[in-house]
Image (tube, rainbow, N blue to C red):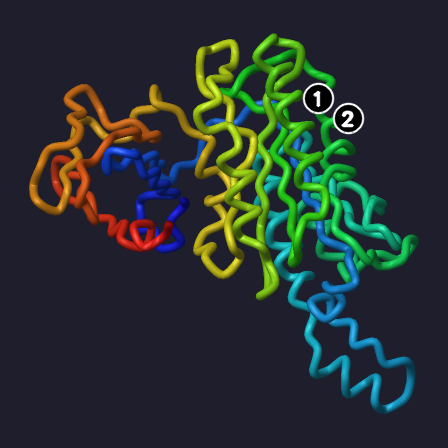
């Protein structure tokens, strides 16, 4: 499972229990990668359950409507504007393609807003779909296909240089998860055969109705698959985060790291009992993979000038 409480400078920590009691740890150190030529996409959930988050009260006209609007703030608009302003800094064309998804009765339609940079996004209202009705379902495959069709008409660059980074914001249960996973496995195979470029897909869950189990399932779908890109690196299309756990926008990039990206000159990993689990004499990479013995409930990264300790006990309580 992916830990919710992560200590900086770690961006993400995943704990995988083994049948013999050992714990396999996959962790990243938060850093902004050198992204070249990538396009950026932002997909905002347009389903009916999101109305209140867009500041839509549902009351039509009169004093009641004004009062309801005042007490139902639009919390999506500032998030969208901030995310666009941030992602535009890394975009190949300086803009972010913004869409509403999960529109129309079955939640399968997409309404495109256009491309925006840091300035133009401030001048548009982000208040939910206008051309299409609010959705009554939440289907992720249509917006995923749309971004793939738009952004992947480029050479297969591999994981080191993603063709696109696409962020999807949702508050509910993904109804077509099986179809999304099937499509993503097919796409990963195309990457491994150098037919398609790598994309990074980031799912942000907002509100109390998010199914984090689904988000974990997408995030971990390639774990142990053995599918690699042209550089021999594992392909991992999806990452996720609950909005309430996002402390920095840079967390969007927390999985865009590799084991050959060195961030510290040297270091080592120890468990709470002082047992050395991994040595990094030639440099600590941004992507860490190591195994801890049964009974471990935390690990410490020691490096010249300091230490960082990460508690993993929340993962141990899960079945």
Q: Which mark is residue 166?
A: none
Q: Identify which residue, 77 or 24, lies in the foreground.
A: 24
Q: Identify which residue, 75 or 168, lies in the foreground.
A: 168
Task: Using the image, determine if residue 125 lies above or below residue 266.
Answer: below
- Circles 1 and 2 in contact, beta carbons < 8 Å: yes
Labels in figure, total: 2
What quarter of the picture does the N terminus occupy?
Answer: top left
View extreme (bottom): residue: 63
Residue position for label 2: 149
Q: Which mark is residue 152?
A: 1
View extreme (left): residue: 274
Hey, which quadrant is residue 140 in on the image? top right
Q: Which residue corresponds to the image point at 68% horizontal and 30% vertical from the top-left?
A: 93
Q: Position of residue 137 (x, y in %)?
A: 78, 54
Q: Position of residue 163 (x, y in %)?
A: 62, 24
Q: Is residue 93 left or right of residue 293?
A: right
Q: Position of residue 21 (x, y in %)?
A: 24, 38
Q: Secondary structure at mark 2?
A: helix
Q: Secondary structure at mark 1?
A: loop
């Amino acid at each position: 499972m992916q830990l919710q409480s992560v200590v900086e400078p770690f961006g993400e920590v995943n704990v995988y229990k083994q049948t013999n009691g050992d714990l396999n740890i996959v962790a990243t150190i938060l850093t902004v990668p050198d992204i070249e030529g990538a396009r950026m996409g932002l997909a905002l959930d347009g389903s009916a359950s999101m109305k209140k988050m867009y500041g839509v009260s549902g009351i039509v006209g009169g004093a009641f409507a004004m009062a309801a609007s005042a007490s139902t703030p639009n919390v999506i608009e500032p998030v969208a504007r901030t995310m666009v302003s941030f992602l535009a800094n890394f975009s190949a064309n300086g803009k972010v393609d913004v869409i509403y998804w999960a529109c129309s009765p079955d939640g399968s339609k997409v309404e495109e807003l256009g491309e925006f940079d840091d300035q133009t996004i401030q001048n548009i209202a982000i208040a939910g779909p206008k051309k299409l009705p609010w959705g009554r379902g939440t289907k992720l495959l249509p917006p995923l296909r749309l971004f793939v069709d738009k952004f992947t008409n480029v050479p297969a660059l591999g994981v080191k240089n993603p063709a696109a980074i696409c962020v999807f914001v949702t508050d509910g249960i993904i109804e077509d998860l099986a179809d999304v996973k099937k499509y993503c496995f097919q796409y990963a195979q195309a990457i491994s055969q150098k037919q398609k470029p790598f994309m990074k897909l980031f799912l942000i869950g907002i509100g109390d109705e998010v199914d984090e189990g689904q988000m974990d399932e997408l995030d971990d779908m390639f774990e142990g698959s053995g599918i690699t890109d042209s550089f021999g690196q594992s392909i991992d299309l999806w990452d996720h985060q609950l909005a309430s756990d996002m402390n920095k926008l840079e967390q969007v990039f927390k999985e865009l790291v590799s084991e050959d990206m060195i961030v510290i000159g040297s270091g080592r990993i120890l468990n709470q009992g002082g047992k050395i689990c991994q040595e990094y004499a030639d440099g600590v990479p941004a992507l860490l993979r190591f195994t801890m013995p049964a009974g471990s409930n935390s690990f410490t990264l020691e490096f010249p000038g300091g230490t960082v300790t990460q508690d993993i006990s929340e993962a141990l309580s899960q079945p």
